[in-house]
Amino acid sequence: MSGDFGPRITIPAAQKFAHRSPDSHLTLFGDAEAIKRAAGRTVLADNISIHPCRDVIAMDAEPRHTLRHGRESSMWQALQALADGRTQACVSAGNSGALMLISRRVLGVIPGVEVPAFSKSMPVESGYTLMLDLGGNLHCSAQQLLQFARMGQIQARASGYDNPRIALLNIGSEAGKGTRLIREAAELLEAAPELNFQGSVEADSIFTGSVEVIVCDGFSGNIALKTSEGVARVLGRRIQHSFSSFSGRVAGVLIWPILRRWRQEFNPDAYNGAVLAGLNGVVVKSHGGAGVEATINALELAAQQARRDVPGTIANAVAAQ
């Protein structure tokens, strides 16, 4: 029940999701009294239950400290329920570093996968592009980038792309560009016959839709993600400010349908939720500052991943290599 807003966002989000998905069951891990206070006079849906937890991991907690002292936290208990088979997916808006470390401790990594990666869909000109890693691993080997590509391919196929195009994030699209690590990774991806590798793409091509999967280390990926979210919000505020005058409001009436569609397509909240690919279970990281609809999107993503058993598909693909 962490995140920037805690139960006052997660409870209404859980209620709405529960009503939209009556075939699902939600278990809320956290302070039972805080959950009830957030619900107020509203009765929780029949397909929602509460698992009381004594502790919560703070957003600024040192991740490694949580491995020693976080067993009674809502995050740990939620992941333990997933490991025990009592749930099929876990969604958390809490501390990203703690979520990664505790997930690895409690769930474990799929045999043959070196490290999990944060993967997330990005809105592009047509469809979406999946990026990974987005912050889980600041330093990656060429072999790990190859594994990210394979996991990204499986996730993209689960979303309807039969032969997803894959690229490396780089400072240039020409062969031979980039660091030694990137060049080594490019050689490995080029030599993998099962991958539809397209070479390198620069950051300004992330949103063109030229590929369905973009592979990068967590440092570069997180910067690209946060930059794109910041730009989207700045543009939204600038557009809103532009229509605050009388002439702007008149113009806004004429083009409002277009603006509304753009807002829906490029609102970062619509793509909230990063999957921790490579774990023995479905774990989705929701943005710490996510609102109600954004949190619902993360829940829907987790349900989709669980129904399609994406971790199992990744495990089978790795075992077959």
Image (tube, rainbow, N blue to C red):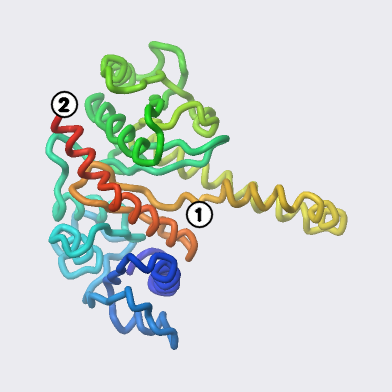
Q: Viewed as shown, does residue 10 lie left or right of 259? A: left
Q: Is residue 3 above or below residue 203?
A: below
Q: Which residue is found at the position 39% from the left and 18% from the top?
A: 178
Judge by depth and name the residue closer to the eye, 272 or 101.
272
Give the quarter of the image for residue 99.
bottom left
For the N terminus, the image quarter is bottom left
Q: Residue furthest bottom?
A: 41
Asked if 68 appears above or below 142 in the picture, the reply is below
- What secondary structure is found at the residue carrying circle 1? helix
Q: Quadrant where the C terminus lies?
A: top left
Q: Tell me which numbered mark, 2 or 1, is placed earlier along the sequence.
A: 1
Q: CA distance from mark 2 to mark 1?
A: 36 Å
Q: Secondary structure at mark 2?
A: loop
Disc 1 target residue: 269
Image location (x, y in percent) of residue 96: 31, 53
The image shows residue 269 at horizontal and vertical percentages of 50, 54
Residue hosting label 2: 321
Q: Residue at x 23, y 73 (%)?
A: 55
Q: In the displayed structure, would residue 105 be above or below residue 152?
A: below
Three-letter residue code for mark 1:
Asp
Query: Which label was assigned to residue 17?
Result: none
- Splitting the image into 4 quarters, where does residue 69 fall? bottom left
Amino acid type, residue under disc 2 in the picture = Gln
